[in-house]
Each structure stands twice: as C-alpha cells, then as structure tokens.
Amino acid sequence: MQNKTKNTQKHGQRDGFATSLGVIAATLGSAVGLGNIWKFPYVTGENGGAAFILIYLLCLLFVGLPVLITELVVGRKAKSNAVRAFKKLAPHQPWFLTGAAGVLSAFLILCFYTTVAGWVYSYVFKAFTGAIYVTSAESSRSIFDSFITGWEPLLWQWVVLVVTGTVIMAGVSHGIERVTKFLMPLLFILLVLSDVRALTLPNAMEGLKFLLEPDWSKITGTAVLTALGLSFFKLSLGMGTMITYGSYMGEQENLVSTALKVASSDTLVSLMAGMAIFPAVFAFGFEPDAGPSLLFITIPMVFSSMPLGRIFLVLFFSLVAIAATTAMISLLEAPVAYLTEERGWSRKKATLLTLLAVALLGATATLSFNLLAEFKLLGRTMFDFFDFITSSVFMPLSGLLGALFVGWFWSRKELEAEATNGGALANGGIVGIYYNVLKYVVPIAITIILLNGLNFF
Ligand code: PHE
C-alpha cells in the first residue's frame, strides 16, 4: 500500500477533489469554524455590533478576498503543498519560507484550536446529559471553570485529534471531500433551526438591532485592526491551508468564483451565528459583551431559560462541533501534505506523527488552565502564546510574503492565465483590480496588523 502511494506520487497523480461541490464544501468547511461561532460573535459584542461588522466587510473585500484568490491560484498552479508550491514557482529563491511559515503556523494553531474544540465536543455531551442545563449565571460559570481547570479537557482534546486524524488518513477525495460534503449541509440546517428558535423569542428584535444598527462611537483603531486580523483568520489565510486546498482543485474549476462563494457564505454563517446568539442573549436580559466566555457560559444559561432550550442546546453545540471539525481537517492537511510530498512519508505515518506532536505540545495549551497556569512564555500562558504567535506573527507574516510574492515577484500574466483558466473565463477584470490592491493595499494593511500584534502602537 505504501509503495503504491509513493508510486502514484512519483508519477504525479495526486489525490484531489473530485467534484465542484466537493471543492466548495471542503473550502467553506475550512473557512467556517470556531472563528464564526466563537470569535466573531464575542468580538462583535465587544466592539459595538453593526459598525464593527461593516468594518469587517470592508477588510474582507479589500484584503481577505484578494489574498484568498491568490492562495488558491498559487496552489493550483503549482499542484503541490504550500512549501513546494513556492519552490516550483520561484526556484532557488527563499520564497518557500512563506509556505514554511504557513505550515508551521497551521501546526501551532492546531495546538490550541484543539483545546477549544475539545471543550465544544464535551459541551455537546454535557448538553445531552443535561449537565450544562443551568438555573443561574453563577452555576454556569462554575461549571465551566471547574471543567477547564480539571483533567477532562485533555481527554476531549485526544478525542478531537482521533476524529480529525481518521478523516485525514482516508485521503483527500475519500476523506476530506466526502466528510465535508455531508457535514456542511447539516451545519447549515442546524444553523437555520437555531436562528428560527432565537428570532421567535419575545424581545428578539433588540438583539437584531444590535447586529444591524451601527454605533460608530465604538469604532477605534484597535477595532479596525481586530477586524482585519479576523478577516484573515476567518478565511484560513497565511497558513498554507488554502494553498494546499487550491492544489487539489481541477483545471476546470473557477477559482475566482470559488473564492467569492466561500467568502460570502462564510460571512453569512457568521451573521447567522450572530442572529442565533444575540436575540437570545437580549431576550433574557443578558449582556452581549461577555468576551470569550459568551459561548461557554452565557449560551448554556440563555438556552436553559428558553422553551425547548435543552434540545436546542444540543443542536447548537453540535453545530459548533461540526464547524470546528471541518476547520481542523484543513489545518491538519497542510502539514500532512508537506510531510508526504517533501519527506516521502506515507499518509498514515505523516498523520499519526503530526497528531502525536499536537497531542504533546497541545497538552500544554489545554493544561494552561490547570497544572501550567503559572507557566508563562512572553508573559502569556501557553494557550495564549499559541494564539498570539500564530494570529499576530506567523499568519500575517506568511500572508504578507504571499502578497508580496504575487504582487511584486510573480508575473501578472501567469496570475491572470491561471485565474481565467487560460483565458476561458471572464475573470480578467476582477483580477486586474485586485492585482493593484494586492500590490499596494494588502502589504500596507498586513504590515499594520503585524506591527499592532507586536505592540508597536
Ligand atoms: N477559518 C477557521 C475558523 O474560522 C480557522 C482556520 C484558520 C482554519 C486557518 C484553517 C486555517 O475558525
């Protein structure tokens, strides 16, 4: 079996997405994740609602989308993992470090993302058994606090790793494509059900207003930078994942329209998550700006107070678990693709060893609330350190280098040829506009995120 894998690779027949629907399901699966249902709502809550969303949309349009298009284009053009992609397009030059920063970053993100995903998995289970069905804010908080300071989260992190690894080991078309094609529609149905429940609560309009009526006084420089960083994290950029997924897309796929569909659907999912959460929060008189604990403390409390709440609590956490899983699949695929193609490892070996490394290093993130609470790196717990080093350093760095590569080094002709499938598609206009955005706007915007992340402002 191993020989067979190596042989097919030697002859250049890589596994890939078999259908256009699979392309959308997998790519959207990567974009939709804890970012939509955990980060987006609490960040929006903290930054004043609608005005923040408008700023976010601008960041998406002028930074996120052009970078997403180019990552898919670079991936498909090179048909290889994120590191080799740059080696192929720019031989004997150090641009491959862009891909290397991305792959390393995907690995490091897994270390803390699997911690939060583990909490989510356990909350699905606890919602089933009724353990998080609470009567007061204090009990909701104490359930969460005693859970994350215990040892149980470590076990859930391993469950998460086994689930994700099983999908990756099954391969690109048999694993990633098949699973995301099934899970993404399910996620959408659960989200619609949650929205219907939340929007039919008395006083739901208050929550909707919060999402739709901008309050510009809340918009500060930090809010803009947060929106910019979020648009990157949301579209899984700067981590080698979109380059890797692009490399699995067939010659006939329209990459520009794929990027547009993914970015708009991802935004829709974020807004729909907000529409499930805020009306419910307002209906029961809670505050919207609860921060990261919005999902784990406020939501169980809110759902416990509503009719049919217990069922909806299970549905809601299941949907978060699905979102987290499809995003983790793409995070794991980036290093696995690198290890199989660059090191010649079998897919099984690459997956198992990456998972082992995530289990060991990721345990330090999970235990940041327990044994390692006092252990600090750069003044942060390990959990915060992984978040910081990836979101504030590696991700913008790799995104910046990628944009500089395409805008200043690679030829515009090749970019256009790949984005229009050799002239067959009418994408020339949009690529022309984005080329200049990519050349000038994106590098400046990302440099600002980077300097902000490193506390220069
Ligand atoms: N986009 C995912 C989310 O919103 C996170 C992610 C980042 C996934 C980078 C893959 C790569 O949660």
Image (cartoon, helix red, strand yellow):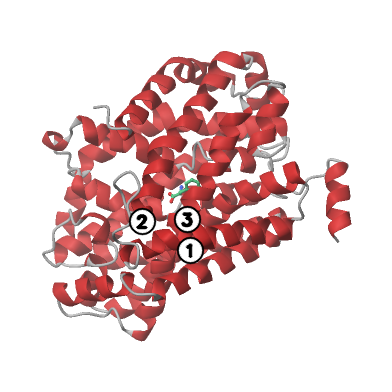
In the displayed structure image, the side of residue 130 where residue 394 appears, left or right? right
Please give the residue where the numbered disc 2 appears in the rendered image. Answer: 37
Q: Which one is nearer the viewer's eye here, 336 or 50?
A: 336
Q: Which one is nearer the viewer's eye here, 16 or 151?
A: 151
**Of the residues shown, which amino acid type is indicated by label 3?**
Cys
Please give the residue where the numbered disc 1 appears in the rendered image. Answer: 322
Report the residue that reaches farthest toward the bottom: 129
Please give the residue where the numbered disc 3 appears in the rendered image. Answer: 111
**Of the residues shown, which amino acid type is indicated by label 2?**
Ile
**Of the residues shown, which amino acid type is indicated by label 1?**
Ile
Position in image of residue 322 (x %, y %): 48, 63
Res 344 visible: yes
Query: Closer to the N terminus: mark 1 or mark 2?
Result: 2
| Of the two numbered discs 3 and 1 in the rendering, the one whose residue sits closer to the viewer | 3
- Looking at the image, residue 405 lies above or below residue 341: above
In the displayed structure image, the side of residue 210 where residue 67 appears, left or right? right
User: Crowdedness of circle 2 by 10 Å Cα count: few (<14), some, many (20+)?
Assistant: many
In the displayed structure image, the side of residue 155 where residue 89 appears, left or right? right
- Report the number of numbered marks: 3
Position in image of residue 315 (x %, y %): 39, 72
Identify the element where label 1 is drawn: helix
User: Crowdedness of circle 1 by 10 Å Cα count: few (<14), some, many (20+)?
Assistant: many
Identify the element where label 3 is drawn: helix
Q: Name which residue lies at 39% across and 75% down.
A: 151
> Mark 3 vs ligand 1: CB under 8 Å?
no
Q: On the image, which quarter does residue 84 sit in? A: top right
User: Crowdedness of circle 3 by 10 Å Cα count: few (<14), some, many (20+)?
Assistant: many
